[in-house]
Amino acid sequence: MSVQAGSESEAQTPQRSLGTAAARNLATTTKSAPQMQEITSRWLLKALPWVSVQGGTYRVNRRLSYSVGNGVVEFVKTGTQVQVIPAELGELPLLRDYEDLDVLGELAQRCRQVDFEAGQELTSFGSPSDEVFLLAHGRIDQIGPGPYGDDAVLRTVADGAYFGEDALVDEESIWEYTARAATPGTALTLSRQDFQLLADRVPSLREHLDRVRAMPAQRTNKYGEAEIDLSAGHQGEAVLPGTFVDYEARPREYELSIAQTVLRVHTRVADLYNQPMNQTEQQLRLTVEALRERQEHEMLNNRDFGLLHNADYDQRIQPHDGGPTPDDMDQLLSMRRGSKLFLAHPKAIAAFGRECNKRGIHPETVDVDGTRVTTWRGVPIFPSNKIPISDARTTSILCMRTGEDEQGVIGLHQPGIPDEIEPSLSVRFMGISEQAIISYLVTAYFSAAVLVPDALGVLENVEIGRWR
């Protein structure tokens, strides 16, 4: 009872000093600059060497190479039924440059769907080969005899790959490996019998195959480039071979891409509300940050020049056990000289860390601009949340060599443009509307180029949800 009486007495006591709520009316608050969650480290933009592109176009001149059709085949899925897109059959070496979509459509209809389980063998080493496999989904290990008598994984293929294409025209072909499913999946098969029946009936397809068979074998090096004739180890007055270096007749050209927006600020805001921070400057700062974030996203994901879509098919590999293991990272490194960096989603880096923990491995770190970055074999692994994660919780890890002098991956921009506030980024005044709104055109020009195919490699279909 005494406590209650005391509380009532305190409640009736009059206020003896100014309260904080009223005091704040006379106080000057200390404010932060506007904050933004979208801002990331943008390591790709920092790590790439940037090349100035005059005229807005960068041409990549390469030594002549002969394409053998190593592309990715795409499919459409309706319920449980999978069909190959007819035009995608042109990725097969035999059908490269064959453009009759009606015939390709009939070939697509003759493909038979095969659903397989993990561990199932689709082909057997040494057995006759009479069909081509088009892998719609899943991962398959191609296993052959190793140098010491045991089995070895010669190659791992995944979504969009094909194998056994020689069987369509070679009646004596055999399987040089056992194709064993590492995961459940779906493939389409096209038999030699169905292919030959259609070729016998359609003159244009038969003539195309005759042209392919009649083409002389091109003398190339192991990279597919036209060979340069040389002589070495000779003595005396040997007749030296004559040669020349041929170039691609139609080299690829990269036009600078663009990211733009119109920033609008009301004149009343710009005139009256500029203390202690300039409203226009803060609006512009955040807009530029968003534009740079979009730039990095496009440089990774744009279907025309994005790095994820421009990695050569021969430079794409699959993890041997789903997760990104040290062995997979070693294989990715071994595919090129002078690798400068890995780029991976933060969750993929965490998954790699778990795989290292299982093996008792502790990757080193290195200081990059004041940030500790994990490395593998001395190559830093930079994080980027712009690399997508699929619905199946898989992602990709990129490894690249950078620099124009190293024939690597480079960024493209054009500094010195009008009204520039950062290299290749401009802000232009567009006027004031009848509603007293000031408009500024904010523009960034950029692109990325892979100078030679082995400058960029990708470890695809990396599982990031494994915890065991």
Image: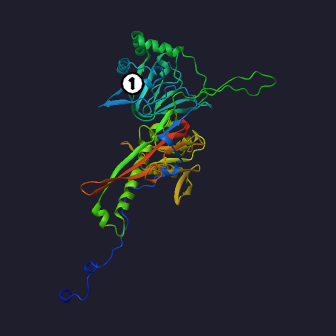
Which residue does the image show at 39% across and 46% down from the upper left?
259
Total marks in image:
1
Task: Name, please, the residue furthest toward the right.
Answer: 236
Is residue 465 visible to us here?
A: no
Residue type, numbered disc 1: Ala
Is residue 76 visible to us here?
A: yes
Q: Quadrant of the N terminus?
A: bottom left
Q: Please state which of residues 95 and 34 is positioned toward the viewer in this rendering.
A: 34
Location of residue 364 in the rendering, given as x and y in whole percent from the top left corner: 57, 55
Which residue does the image show at 36% across and 70% down from the upper left?
276
Quadrant in which residue 366 is drawn = bottom right
Q: How is the image coloured?
A: rainbow
In this rendering, position of residue 245 left or right of residue 138: right
Location of residue 289 in the rendering, given as x and y in whole percent from the top left corner: 40, 55
Q: Please tell me whether residue 130 is drawn above or below residue 406 in the rendered image.
A: above
Q: Please state which of residues 217 and 284 is positioned toward the viewer in this rendering.
A: 284
Other residues around mark 1 within 10 Å, as few (<14) / some (14–19) / many (≥20): some
In this rendering, position of residue 81 left or right of residue 316: left
Location of residue 131 in the rendering, given as x and y in whole percent from the top left corner: 45, 20
Of helix, strand and loop, which one carries label 1? helix
Q: Please tell me whether residue 455 is drawn above or below residue 359 in the rendered image.
A: above
Location of residue 176 in the rendering, given as x and y in whole percent from the top left corner: 54, 24
Residue corresponding to mark 1: 87
